[in-house]
Amino acid sequence: MPVEIKVKIKEVIRRNYNVKSFRLEVPGPLNFKAGQFLSVKLKDDPQLKKYLSISSSPTEKCYLEFTKKLTESDFSKILDSLKAGDQVVIEYPFGKFVLDESFPKIAFLSGGIGITPIRSICKYVVDKNLGSDMVLVYANQSVKDVVFKDDFDAMVKSYPALRVAHVLCETQAGFKCTVGRINREVIKSEIPDYQERKFYLCGPPQMVEAMRLLLAQELGVSAEMIVTENFQGY
């Protein structure tokens, strides 16, 4: 059952020009599965509440982390002003966007800040050395929008069964990527064994629905092999 607690911010980490991670000091053992989400309430105000994915892994035991794209909303503006030592109210865990450890081959399709629960899952698999064969296809507007690049680079180096393919709308010199959008051809090229994999989709709701239809209608992936999460995190 989810529990609500007031916690202190331990550290704030800038991930790129408009994304920050907030690491929280949570009393007692961390009780969540990789890929789940929490609610964050600011100033004890129910109007300043958002559901956000947990970006840390249960293997990272010294903190609980969420990561947010900062916009012009009141919630984002207040969140952006917070620093180490400030407090927020969280409730967790929620959600069923969790790894099926019995399935040996996994594929992730993600866009933008939708990478947060996938970072949690991948970090968990790598730290536990579970042996899952994982492919991530990650779409962004440009390289400056990529989140957790250093984390995924490190995971790929230490865990050969993880591969990351970037898809950008704008090309960038020296950055390996496919230019365009995730489509049938990209999936066939980057995930040639797609019929053998369970797919996890996370990103803006319109993107997730487009990816679900692409997999089901154009590539014949069955519904039970597609995992999505529905929550108001955008």
Image (tube, helix red, strand yellow):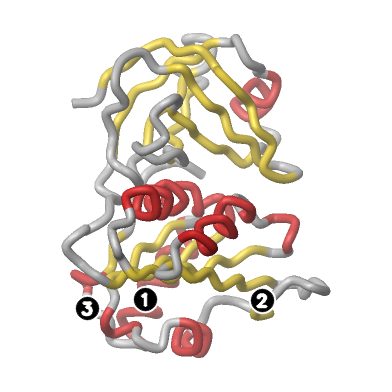
Name the residue tied to disc 2: 177
Q: Residue at x 60, y 23 (%)?
A: 11
Residue placed under numbered mark 3 in the picture: 222
Q: Position of residue 221 (x, y in %)?
A: 27, 81
Q: Are marks 3 and 2 in contact (CB under 8 Å)?
A: no
As displayed, is residue 13 above or below residue 110?
above
Instruction: Identify residue type, mark 2.
Output: Cys
Which residue appears at 42% of the width and 46% of the height?
120
In the rendered structure, which disc, 2 or 1, sits on the residue that comes first in sequence?
2
Find residue 32 and report its image quarter.
top left
Which sits earlier in the primary sequence, circle 3 or circle 2? 2
Left or right relative to 43: residue 69: right
Q: Residue furthest right?
A: 173
Contact between labelled residues 3 and 1, with CB atoms less than 8 Å apart: no
* Quadrant placement of the N terminus: top left
Residue 220, by quadrant, is bottom left
Q: Is residue 43 above or below residue 141?
A: above
Q: Marks 1/3: CA distance?
A: 11 Å
